[in-house]
Amino acid sequence: METVDAVDGYKFADESTSDVRVCFRRTGAHGEQPEWFPCHSSVLSDRSKYFADLLGQSDARSGGSNNCIEVQCPRAEYDHYVKLLKFMYLSRDSIEDAITSVKSALGVLRAATSLKSEFVAETCIGYLESASWDEKEEEEILQFAQTLAPEAAVPLLARLQAPSANAVKTVFISAVRFATSMETSAAAFFDDLKTAAQEQIDFMLHDGDDPAIVMMDEDVRSVLREGLTKLLSTLRTGLDLLASEFDKLPEQAEQRIVRSLVDIDWITTVLTKIELMNEFVSGWLEISDHVVSVVQEEKYSSGLWAVKTKLIEVTGKALDAVGYGSVILPSTSRAHLVKTWLPYIRTTKRFLDAKAKDEAFPRMDAGLCQNIESAIVSLILALPSGDQSDILSEWMQKADQFRYPDLTEAFEMWCYRSKTAIRRLNGATDKGCNPISL
């Protein structure tokens, strides 16, 4: 539609050329002096079907002598109706420049819809479609869009519609690749993007009051396995390079390993939600001997405490999964997990407790310590009695040095079970039974 000012040259409220006056009567406004706006019937008729119909009816009744129009409008919408009147005299670009906010555009849109001003309504919709909305504004736009004709509401609803499952999966997989550093970049914002990707993955998987956005399929599970492999590989590579980097820049070398462990800690939460913790536990077992051997080297005996503490947190996830049966491993693997990490955990915890008053050293959360201790006890009790006796014997020999973890419960249960097993064996022997079958 051509602009009015380009065709007729009229200006809003120009009394010298106006042939009609418009007044908006505010509902519920008693005693307020109405304001009359000089307008032009050709402009109103061209830009509003409401005015075109009204002016046509007036001309038919009075031969064109009635030049005053009163329109009822909600009191709260008065300013928007006045803006609508002004916008009828502007080009599309000028209207967009004159709109100052989403709230203003939505108000004028309501007025334009009421007075059937298609041109102004389309312009407001174009502005809203390209503007940023906050949550409250989005709810208002959605509510109003539902009152529009379907073809008019399409631009507003396009970004509010739920994306397809395939689109969600594509975005999720891309986020996983960033979150697990499968996409590498030297850009300064890469770490921020990785953190944002991790946060949004957590949000997409959260199914508290709202449904989870991502539906798991083999493609998603596959990329998460790939991401886990990448993170574990990155940790191992970092540990291999630690010796040379630590000599030059010890703080940076330590922080590099800590960041790697933080990423692994994060992905364990994701894997728990999709029942892939067995992948993490298996991978962690594969590198456990190497990890422990590196961080316990003599040159790091008085350093790497942030790394050593974070290692306990990450290992606690594996101990919890295995100890409480969410991950099933052969007894040899379970025994190896305990025998590898139990000495490390108790030694590290003892040192940190001794430095509890030194703010330079990290702290271990009391709840975390309790969870790890409970998981270790549960895990030990599920081992063959021979492995239990090895672990408990070694624990009692050093009990005067290490108070954590407390394996008293496991020891008591081992004694009870051992005595019961001997009684059963003796009873079977007395009856002439084959003890191997018991």
Image (cartoon, rainbow, N blue to C red):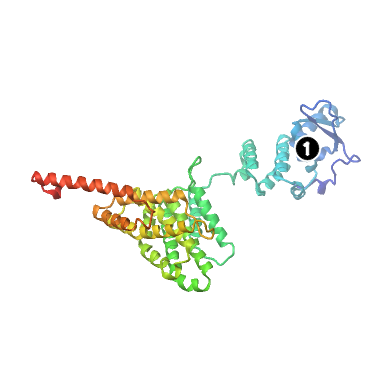
* Whole-percent x, y for residue 155 in the image: 63, 45
Instruction: State the count of labels.
Output: 1
Above/below status of 111 relative to 238: above
Can residue 438 be seen in the rendering of this structure? Answer: no
- x 74%, y 46%: residue: 100
Furthest residue toward left: 432
The residue at which mark 1 appears reads as: 79
Q: Is residue 163 visible?
A: yes
Q: Tell which of 387 and 143 is nearer to you.
A: 387
Tag 1 secondary structure: helix
Query: Does 258 sit left or right of 77 as displayed?
Result: left
Q: Quadrant of residue 221?
A: bottom left
Q: Report the side of 114 relative to 193 (left or right).
A: right
Q: In the image, is 376 to the left or to the right of 70?
A: left
Look at the picture and state if 98 lies above or below 40: below
Q: Residue at x 50, y 65 (%)?
A: 254
**Left or right relative to 434: residue 32:** right
Depth order, front residue of 407/208: 407
Image location (x, y in percent) of residue 3: 78, 47
Q: Quadrant of residue 332?
A: bottom left
Q: Specify the amino acid type for callout 1.
A: Asp
> Could you tell me which residue is drawn at 74 percent across and 31 percent down?
74
Give percent across and percent down for residue 166.
48, 51
Q: Position of residue 239 (x, y in %)?
A: 44, 68
User: Which image quadrant for residue 33?
Assistant: top right
Instruction: Bin the neighbour count of mark 1 within 10 Å (Cα to Cα): few under 14, some 14-19, many 20 and up.
Output: some
Task: Give the residue furthest to the front.
Answer: 400
